[in-house]
Image (tube, grey):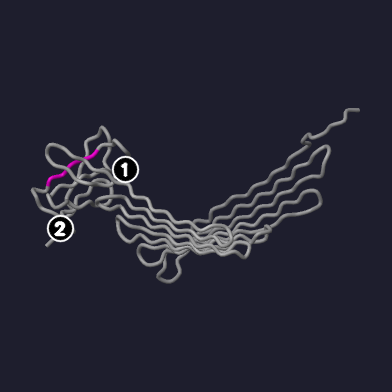
């Protein structure tokens, strides 16, 4: 007879996926069994549960749990992931992610905050294999530049910090201004506020403020399309 090596024999898979909308619960189950002609069979089990709910005055809390078991060559790997996310105040989110049982346990707590249209930051603190890590990130769409700051500390591995400033200058016969850049050579709009400084002008992104000559350049506009920019009356100087 034929000797068969390295060939699949059979594979069975069964999946159940259900979203219970009224309860805010999703369930996913999966079972897969793989047999071979020349080696031990492999079996996979996966389960995932997620739940959205309100906790007192805190709306839209989400939690999800995933468990898995993988059997092969008469041994088994098993583990679980947990993730939790909840709004904090009007513009912030607190999150937790954990990974357990797969050899290296790790967990991380995160805080994300949008300070205003132009500014957001994120801070993550975690442990993995008994090593601590701290990661921070700050981004601000300023009138003169887009500013990105990052700092990372991973115990026993590396420490890093970064600063990125993206800006440009546009000069025309009608005046000019320094500004942040979306993409080099992209469309820009020069606004003249009749010589008035500190007037907020908005295109598609965060407001930019006119300079001491009353000029501002809006860079977050579309190429080849009619664009609108407007003065943000709520932020006018006194």
* Precedes in sequence: disc 1 or disc 2: 1
Image-based side of 126 in relation to 171, left or right? right
- Viewer-proximal residue among 40 and 157: 157
Residue located 53% across and 58% down the image: 25
Q: Residue furthest bottom?
A: 56
Mark 1 crowd level (few <14, some 14–19, many ≥20, 10 Å Cα) = some
Q: Residue under circle 2?
A: 236
Q: Residue under circle 1?
A: 182
Q: Residue furthest left?
A: 194
Residue 185 seen: yes
Range of residues picked out in magenta: 188-192
Element type at marker 2? loop
Magenta span: helix, strand or loop, mainly?
A: strand
Comparing marks 1 and 2, which lies closer to the viewer?
1
Residue 87 rendering spot, x and y as whole percentages: 42, 64
Indicate the quadrant where residue 113 lies.
Answer: bottom left
- Viewer-proximal residue among 20 and 8: 8
73 over 100 or under it: above or below? above
Element type at marker 1? loop
Indicate the quadrant where residue 58 lies.
Answer: bottom left
- Viewer-proximal residue among 116 and 142: 142
Residue 23 seen: no
Residue located 33% across and 53% down the image: 147
- Viewer-proximal residue among 62 and 178: 178
Indicate the quadrant where residue 36 lies.
Answer: top right
3 over 77 or under it: above or below? above
CB under 8 Å between discs 1 and 2: no
Mark 2 crowd level (few <14, some 14–19, many ≥20, 10 Å Cα) = few
């Amino acid at each position: 007879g034929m000797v068969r090596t390295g060939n699949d024999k059979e594979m069975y898979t069964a999946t159940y996926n259900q979203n219970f909308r009224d309860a805010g619960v999703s369930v996913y189950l999966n079972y897969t069994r793989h047999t071979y002609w020349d080696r031990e069979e492999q079996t996979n089990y996966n389960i995932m549960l997620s739940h959205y709910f309100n906790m007192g005055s805190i709306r839209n809390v989400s939690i999800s749990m995933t468990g898995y078991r993988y059997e092969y060559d008469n041994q088994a790997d098993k583990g679980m992931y947990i993730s939790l996310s909840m709004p904090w105040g009007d513009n912030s989110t607190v999150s937790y992610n954990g990974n357990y049982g797969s050899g290296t346990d790790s967990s991380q707590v995160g805080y994300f905050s949008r300070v205003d249209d132009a500014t957001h930051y994120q801070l993550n603190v975690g442990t993995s294999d008994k090593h601590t890590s701290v990661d921070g990130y700050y981004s601000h769409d300023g009138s003169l530049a887009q500013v990105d700051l990052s700092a990372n500390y991973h115990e026993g591995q590396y420490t890093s910090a970064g600063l990125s400033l993206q800006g440009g200058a546009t000069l025309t016969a009608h005046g000019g201004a320094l500004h942040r850049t979306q993409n080099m050579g992209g469309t820009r709009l020069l606004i003249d506020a009749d010589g008035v400084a500190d007037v907020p002008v908005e295109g598609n992104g965060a407001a930019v403020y006119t300079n001491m000559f009353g000029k501002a350049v809006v860079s977050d506009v579309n190429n080849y399309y009619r664009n609108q920019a407007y003065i943000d009356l709520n932020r006018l100087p006194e």
